Amino acid sequence: MSQKINLTLKVWRQKSVDTKGQFETYKADGIETDMSFLEMLDVVNERLTKDGREPIAFDHDCREGICGTCGAVVNGQAHGPLRGTTLCQLHMRHFHDGQTLVIEPWRASGFPIIKDLVVNRFAFDRIITAGGFISVKTGQAPDAHSLPVGKEEAEISMDAAQCIGCGACVAACPNGSAMLFASAKVTHLNILPQGEVEKDRRTLGIVKQMDQEGFGNCSNEYECEAACPKSISVANIARLNAYHRKAKSPTA
């Protein structure tokens, strides 16, 4: 049976990227432990609306841990205290009665705040546009078994393809680096025969765009892997570095 807990929320409120923000405190009483974190915010927003106050702005869509839309830092941890879990999959049973939750948006220069907990993640879209695709014309789709792919390569590619682009890796990194995201997108395509033809162009394009977006450099803190809801491995970053060196010096 679901229990109810009382919480204190300290939520970052900011009207726009051009205004200063601050933490505001709210009481979240009678929260059912079976609720997800976003459902808890829904309840708080309903109460704020009834009181004539502006609700808390936060991103959400599928609420199934697939789309990568939701995200916030809870008590200093991107997506909250559970590993391998998105914010929408985090349930209130993992918190205790009387607890104070500090909720704030992703903090990174590449993710300017739009409002409250909502940040602009279009930088990720521009990185994908710079090379996260296969443009080689293959004509009619071949039969699945006609292009052999090794088991190890297939597994590495599919593991990297799980990245949902939520940005938790950037938020968790002390440098605001997007290397885990970029390396997952490069690995996903470069390691397969279909993507090998354009791997140099893809690698150089994605890295160049990532740098232009103002993300920091990787310094091997491994915080990105710890925060990633899909447990993307930092081994992909080493793989990206190898791809990038070879793309810059193809004869090396």
Image (cartoon, rainbow, N blue to C red):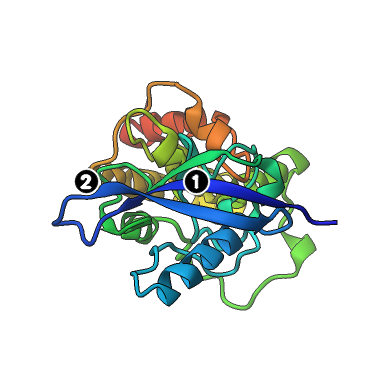
What is the number of the mark on residue 79?
none
- State the SS at label 1: strand
- Find residue 15 and report its image quarter: bottom left
Question: Hey, which residue is sitting farthest top in the picture?
Answer: 220
Q: Quadrant of the C terminus?
A: top left
Which residue lies under the disc numbered 2? 212
Image coordinates for residue 219, horizontal then vertical, percent: 38, 21
Which residue lies under the disc numbered 1? 8
Q: Quadrant of the N terminus?
A: bottom right
Q: Residue at x 50, y 42 (%)?
A: 101
Image coordinates for residue 245, horizontal then vertical, percent: 37, 29
* Location of residue 151 with respect to 193 vertically, above or below: above
Image coordinates for residue 102, horizontal then vertical, percent: 44, 41
Identified by mark 2, the residue type is Gln
Nearer to me, 95 or 169: 95
Nearer to me, 125 or 208: 125
* Location of residue 104 with respect to 220 vertically, above or below: below
* Location of residue 121 with respect to 244 vertically, above or below: below
Image coordinates for residue 44, horizontal then vertical, percent: 50, 63
- Say which of marks 1 and 2 sits in front: 1
Q: Residues within 10 Å of mark 1 (few under 14, many from 20)?
A: some
Nearer to me, 159 or 154: 159
Q: CA distance from mark 1 to mark 2?
A: 39 Å
Question: Hey, which residue is sitting farthest left in the picture?
Answer: 18
Identified by mark 1, the residue type is Thr
- The answer to whether any part of residue 165 appears in the image is no
- Find residue 220 and report its image quarter: top left
- The answer to whether any part of residue 204 appears in the image is yes
Q: Residues within 10 Å of mark 2 (few under 14, many from 20)?
A: few
